[in-house]
Amino acid sequence: MIDKQLITRRFSRAVESYNREAVAQKRIVCRMSDMLEHHLSRPCGRVLEIGSGTGFLTRRLVEMFHPKELVLNDICQEMSVCFTDLLENGQATFWAGDAETLSFPGDQDLIVSCSALQWFVSPERFFARCHVLLRAKGCFAFTTFGKDNLKEIASVAGSGLHYRSLEELKETLCMHYEIVDACEERICLTFDTPLQVLYHLKHTGVSAVRQLAWTKRNLQDFCDKYVRLFSDGHSVTLTYHPIYIIAKKK
């Protein structure tokens, strides 16, 4: 089950640490930015960003596309402090709240999202909503995560999100969109210890799938199992499995 209140709390607490710890997310934004620059014309009139976070992608959108209207959304109101300059000079507006329920303005040229849709209860319904919000031939570009995402955590802790494969996502989208580009990759991070993995997840907000408090015993059990399964004798791994899709409204 997706607990939106827990997600909001965990990401709100990670506002100050996210930029430091979100190594994989920065790499994902860079790749999506390159794809957008390759496939989309500029300038771009109206842009809606879902899950803007601290602004990794936002700043690139402003630089690349100079949107006339930019709506930023994040489930955490606290993220708005990352865009004070854009909000004060009228370059953007910020809509705090759950993107699955907010009524966004329509007639968008581009709807874009990085590393957010995996937290949605029904990405499929959101895909259909975005189709309505887009202008004719408007683009919907997003990254989410595939089935190998954080596979180490799923194996050791037995908890995780339900991830869709690239093919499943393409099949869902094809009713309303033409796929312009779609690809996936694995990003393998290394850490000295499993405790550093947990620190990384906490300070990027990604630990929002687990609400139970750690005890000394189950923390030790987690670390022992993690080392046994995912250590090369010197470090342990953590895998991200990003999926990248750019789709055009039919």
Image: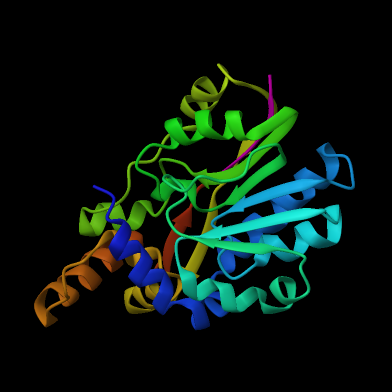
Residue 247, image x, y percentages: 67, 30
Question: Residue drawn at (73%, 78%), measured in percent from left and top?
Answer: 85
Horizontal side of residue 47 vs 190, given as left or right:
right
Q: Can the viewer see residue 200?
A: no
Q: Is residue 247 one of those drawn in magenta?
A: yes
Q: Nearer the viewer, residue 179 or 84?
A: 84
Place of residue 47 in the rendered image (x, y in percent of width and height, measured from the top left): 72, 48
In this view, the residue in front, 197 or 144, is 144
- Residue at coordinates 15% horizontally, 70% vertically from top-left? 221
Question: Is 194 situated above or below 153?
Answer: below
Q: Where residue 187 appears, x then y in whole percent? A: 55, 55
Q: Position of residue 72 (x, y in %)?
A: 62, 59
* 75 to 182, vertically: above or below: below
Residue 204 shows in the view? yes
Q: Chief secondary structure of the magenta span?
A: strand
**Which quadrant holds residue 87?**
bottom right
Query: Which region shows up in magenta?
Result: 243-250
Q: Residue at x 41, y 46 (%)?
A: 101
Q: In the picture provided, is 212 more to the left or to the right than 62?
A: left
- Hey, which residue is sitting farthest right in the picture? 42
Tell me: 247 left or right of 155.
right
